[in-house]
Image: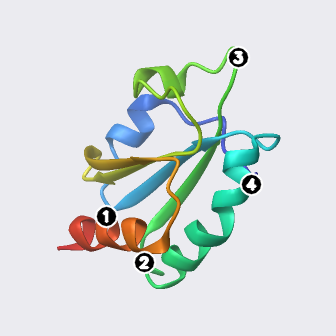
Amino acid sequence: MDADNKLKRADLDMLKEPGVVEFGASWCGYCQAAQPIITAALTQYPNINHIKIEDGKGQHLGRTYAVKLWPTLIFLKDGIEISRLVRPTDTNSITNALDELTS
């Protein structure tokens, strides 16, 4: 997982464009299994900012969003959480959330 662990909550709160923040871990089997469906869904939305965060012990950012399971996708509009998906298993659930985000 190419992760941006330099971001702080304030950075995400100030996002002006729609975005998806993906919390996970490179060694997480659920995260690895979800990558193809996440990629397939996001391919249909090239203007959506996709931010991957390597989460785990000692990583504070995920706790500020109450992330407990990986992967967790948080859909942000103007820095505000619109929806979230925990351990998505199909492309449709992700594209539905992306549709909501872009409407």
The alpha-carbon separation of the residues under discs 2 and 4 comes to 24 Å
The alpha-carbon separation of the residues under discs 2 and 3 comes to 31 Å
| Horizontal side of residue 99 vs 28, given as left or right | left
Dot label at residue 32: 4
Which quadrant would the C terminus be assigned to in this image?
A: bottom left
Task: Point out the tag, 2 or 3, that comes first from the N-terminus.
Answer: 2
Q: In the orientation shown, which residue stands out farthest toward the top? A: 58
Q: Which residue position holds label 2?
A: 47
Amino acid type, callout 1: Ala
Amino acid type, callout 3: Lys
Amino acid type, callout 4: Gln
Q: Residue at x 70, y 16 (%)?
A: 57
Task: Point out the tag, 1 or 4, that comes first from the N-terminus.
Answer: 4
Residue 77: % across, % down: 26, 55
Colouring scheme applied when the structure was drawn:
rainbow
- Of 100 and 59, which appears nearest the observer? 100
